[in-house]
Structure formats: C-alpha cells, structure tokens
Image (cartoon, coloured by chain):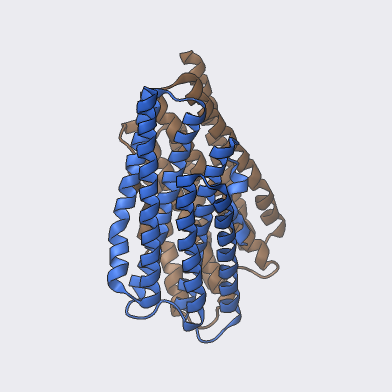
Chain colours: A brown, B blue
C-alpha cells in the first residue's frame, strides 16, 4: 500500500516536471517569436498550450484519486496539496507564455517591440527561462540553494520591468500608443512568470523545511508597484 | 464524526464568504479611490489586504486539517479541494484590488485616469463589483442561474477593456505615456478580476453538477487577445 502510494506520488512528480519542461520550451519559443517576429513559432506555442492544460488535469485527478484511496496524513498529505498548487501555478505560467506568443502574432509582420526595448526584453526573457530551468532542478533535487538563485533572477526581472516602464514613460516620442500598450503588457507577463517561479520554489522550501505556506511572503507580485 | 465534519465544512464556507465580502469592499473602495483620487481610501485598501491573506491561511489550514483527520471521499473530498482552489483565487482577487489602489496612490494628487476613460472605468468597476457580489450569492445559495449572469458581466468587462485599449491605441494625442501604462495595467487588473469571478462560479457549477474542472474551459483569460 505504502509502496503503491509512493509510486503514485512519483507519477505526479514526473507530470509536474513534464509540465515545467513544457513551460520552459513555451516561454523560450514565445520569446524567440517575439524578438525575431517568427509567426510559425508563435503559432506553435499557442497550439501547444493545451498539452500543459492536459497535464494539469492529469495531476489534479491523480491527487484527488490518491487522497480518496489512501487518506494520507502528515508529509504525504502536504506533498499532495503542494502538487495541486503547483499544477495550477504551472498552468498559469503556460498561459502567460501563450500571451507573449499572442502579442507576437498580433503584431506580425511588424515587430512588437520598439528597438529601444529589444535588448532589455531579450535579457528579461533569458532570466525568466533560466528561472524556470532552475525551478525544475529545485523540484527535482530539492536543492534550496538554487531556490535563492530563482529569487535573485526574479528580482532582476522586476528591476528590468521597472527600467523599461521608466524609459517608456519618459520618452514621449518614438513609441506608438499600441507599442506602449504591448510593452506594458509584455513586461507584466514576464514579471508574473518570475513571481510564479518564486512561488514554486518557496512551496518546495516549505515542503522541505516543514513550515506552512504564507501567501503574504509568497506574494512577490506586490513589489511591482 | 460526520456531523463534526459538516460543521467544519461550514466554518470553511463561512471563511470563503468572508473573503469574498472583503474582496468586494476592497474592489469598491479601490475603484472609488481611483475615480475620486481619494488617497485615504487607497491606503485603507492597501493596509486591509492582509486580512484577506490571513483568511486564506485559515481556510488552507482547516482544509489540510480536515483532510488529515477525516479522510473524506467523494463529494466531501471534492468540496475541500474546491475550497483550496477558491481561497487562492480570492487571495489573488484581493491582490488585484490592492494593485488598483496602488495605482491610485502612486498618481495622487494627479488623477490616474484620463478624462476620456473615466466613464468606461466607472462602468467596468461597477460590473466587477456586481460580479463579485453575484459570485458571493452563487457560493452561498448554489444558484447556477446567477452564475450565467457572472459570465455575462465578465464578457462586458472584457468588451470594455478592448474598447478602452482601442481608443487609447488610436488616439496619439492627449495621453501621457505614463497614463497609457496606467490605463493598460488597470484595464488588465479589472479584466483579471472578472476572469477570477468566472472561475469561482464555474467551480461551484462543477461541484453542483459533479463534473471535474477543466482548466481549458476555465481559462477565459485567453479570450483577451
């Protein structure tokens, strides 16, 4: 019974890792589509989001099934509740990557990004993809030292978003209003992806150290303003 | 045992209802602060978000405790899993209301909204507050007819956001870039609040009708673009 439980837990872990792998690919491709104006790649990200959604359904069904069949307590129960939270966070990260691809598609064949912002968005995308890659390792190896790196990357993403917003707000020429709207939304999408990565590694931290999740400490989003 | 379980479930339901009442007040006050430039009200919303966060912690702890002590199955189990989802959605709605108050505070004593957009934001705020109010009734009375009204209100909010974005994008004069950034973010905050209300009433729908939650159908956010 207990062995069966742990093999089920392993399936859930593998599904979560597959979700985060798909999110990493989606965000990398969406960012390339945005920076290079690659319509085909944008379409592929948009069409692929359903696979991430499917995996969320799988994880949630497995968790509910395990809760019903095995009545876990203590650490096992906390792991299952964490898996529910994480699947929903990962699904949202997939949506946000899709949103970036949708902006790239909407503006095609025009470039969605003004030249002045390209370099910062490229850096922001690299940081976000790296944060997801590190988060994957934190989930897989329970490596809390790497969790701190994810938090740093998130702070750098926040700083870049502020930098971009400040530049756009100062510069009253050279941007069309449509570009300002796009840049504002895109900055926000990357910033939210960083927040979600932090919330994932904090959840692993809580699992490893045994404390409960406090949404106030996990709500890094509040630092945006 | 079963009676104790149901009295615990009732406490969870009451906490969720208290959360949504606080979210309704927060959004109404944040919207007034935004439209009237009322700094004190903005501060109150920002300071009050912690109460919504506290309630989420309460709900989550109660759910985990009930799962551990009572090992519920079937409908009882699905209700507890739904409560976990709903507490996290409500916490996020509180954050988004706080974000609106933060924009109002950041721009004070200037008006955050250009005159041309005031009427549409006022309408969007009314729709969002009404959607939350209806959602409260759906949770309390399991009234699925009212759930359809929430979905309609959400569509109207989406349409207003598109209308505002289109007007801003067309009008290359009269807006400062800072105003365009604010209007873009504010539109997005209200739109997300509408999405979250829909996700809450759909979750109640799934509980009442017994089907499982499919994130693809709940992801109304994707209709934004």
- In the rendered image, the quadrant that contains the N terminus of chain B is top left
Identify which residue is drawn at 30% across, 53% down: B50
- In the rendered image, the quadrant that contains the C terminus of chain B is bottom right
Which of the two residues, B199 or B3, is positioned nearer the viewer here?
B3
Classify residue A206 by image quadrant.
top left
Outermost residue on the bottom side: it is: B173
Q: In this view, does B111 lie above or below A48?
A: below
Identify which residue is drawn at 30% across, 52% down: B51
- x, y (%) of residue A212? 32, 37
Which of the two residues, B167 or A177, is positioned nearer the viewer here?
B167
Identify which residue is drawn at 36% across, 58% down: A222
Which of the two residues, B128 or A162, is positioned nearer the viewer here?
B128
- x, y (%) of residue B53? 33, 49
- x, y (%) of residue B85? 46, 42
Decide if residue B102 is on the left or right side of residue B148.
Answer: left
Classify residue A199 by image quadrant.
top left
Decide if residue B110 is on the left or right side of residue A168.
Answer: left
Number of numbered tags placed on the structure image: 0
Identify which residue is drawn at 41% across, 45% down: B87
- x, y (%) of residue A18? 57, 36
- Residue A65: in sight, yes or no? yes
Which of the two residues, B47 or A132, is positioned nearer the viewer here?
B47
- Residue A152: in sight, yes or no? no
Outermost residue on the top side: it is: A1
Q: Is residue A9 above or below residue B10?
A: above
Decide if residue A128 is on the left or right side of residue A217.
Answer: right
């Amino acid at each position: 019974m207990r062995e069966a439980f742990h093999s089920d837990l392993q399936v859930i872990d593998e599904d979560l890792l597959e979700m985060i792998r798909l999110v990493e690919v989606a965000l990398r491709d969406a960012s390339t589509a945005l920076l290079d104006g690659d319509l085909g790649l944008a379409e592929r990200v948009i069409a692929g989001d359903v696979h991430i959604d499917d995996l969320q359904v799988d994880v949630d069904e497995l968790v509910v099934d395990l809760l019903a069949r095995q009545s876990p307590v203590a650490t096992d129960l906390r792991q299952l509740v964490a898996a529910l939270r994480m699947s929903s966070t990962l699904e949202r990260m997939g949506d946000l990557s899709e949103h970036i691809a949708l902006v790239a598609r909407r503006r095609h064949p025009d470039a969605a990004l003004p030249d002045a912002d390209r370099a910062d968005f490229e850096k922001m995308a690299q940081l976000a993809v790296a944060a997801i890659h590190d988060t994957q390792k934190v989930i897989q190896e329970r490596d809390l030292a790497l969790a701190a790196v994810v938090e740093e990357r998130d702070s750098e993403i926040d700083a870049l978003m502020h930098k971009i917003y400040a530049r756009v707000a100062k510069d009253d020429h050279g941007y069309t209003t449509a570009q300002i709207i796009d840049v504002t939304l895109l900055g926000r999408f990357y910033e939210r992806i960083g927040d979600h990565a932090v919330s994932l590694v904090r959840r692993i931290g809580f699992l490893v150290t045994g404390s409960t999740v406090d949404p106030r400490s996990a709500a890094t989003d509040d630092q945006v303003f």
